[in-house]
Amino acid sequence: MGTASAYACIPQTSDDNFLGLQTRKSLYSKGRNAHLTAALFYMLDVFRSILLYSRQKYDYMIFVRYLMGTAYMPSPRSVIAHDFFASIVPRPDFMFFLDVTPQEAYRRVKTRRRQEMFENPKELELVRQRALSLAMRGKMDNHRCGETHWAHREGDPCHCLSELNQNRHPLLQD
């Protein structure tokens, strides 16, 4: 049996740097400016993470949301932002889309002390629809973003990668 692969799991919002902290602060605010500020700092934080982690040696990296973070922007900006960022960020060999129902997402969010601006049933449904639409764009345009794998599992993305690795899933074979 082979050795376990090294991997990094990068969360959707970093709390270890200025960009991530500004994203988090904006997400707890209200209004149009907070929405735009959160989107801007989120994308800058993603770029920072890509630059930081791409220099390190990992067999696999998993970014939570990666390009799907653009689904939090209103339409049609979400599509424009997705296509723009997809054209400049490193293209993964595989993308996994973990589809969680808005009801399940909201059930999880309600257990937190504070909710972000998007964490209500209406917004979660809108974001999910945009994310599904963006994922389908990627699925139909595989030359840009690699192979897209769909999972209708209500699980943590990092746990899912660990489980795939532990079970030596064919996608993670050398």
Image (cartoon, rainbow, N blue to C red):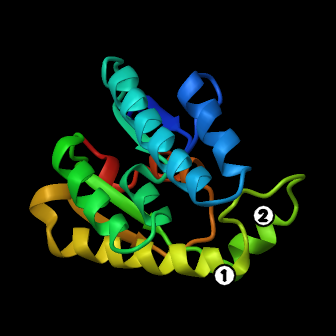
Question: Could you tell me which secondary element the residue under label 1 belongs to?
Answer: helix
| Vertical position of residue 98 compared to residue 140: above or below | above
| Residue 32 visible at all | yes
Q: Earlier in the sequence, mark 2 or mark 1?
A: 2
What quarter of the picture does the C terminus occupy? top left
- From this view, report whether residue 33 is shown above or below residue 132: above
Amino acid tagged 2: Val
As measured in the structure, the alpha-carbon distance from the residue carrying label 2 to the one carrying label 1 is: 13 Å
Residue plotted at (65% across, 60% down): 31
Give the label, 2 or 1, closer to the camera: 1
Residue located at (36% from left, 54% from top): 67
- Where's the N terminus, which quadrant? top left
> Callout 1: few (<14), some (14-19), or many (20+) C-alpha neighbours within 10 Å?
few
| Residue closest to the eye, 76 or 10 | 76
The numbered disc on residue 122 is: 1
Q: Is residue 24 above or below residue 59?
A: below
Q: Residue 163 in the image: x percent, y percent?
A: 54, 52
Image coordinates for residue 3, horizontal then vertical, percent: 42, 30
Q: In the depicted view, which residue is nearer to us: 75 or 129? A: 75
Q: State the residue at coordinates (53%, 45%).
A: 37
What amino acid type is highlighted by mark number 1?
Lys
Residue 117 position, x and y percent, is: 69, 60
Instruction: Count residues near mark 2 (Cα–Cα under 10 Å), then give few for <14, some for 14-19, many for 20+.
Output: some
When asked about the image quadrant of residue 23, the answer is top right
Q: Secondary structure at mark 2?
A: helix
Expressed as whole percent of the image width and height from the top left, the position of residue 141 reads 14, 69
Relative horizontal placement of residue 6, taking residue 24 as reference (left or right)? left
Q: Quickly name the residue at label 2.
A: 109
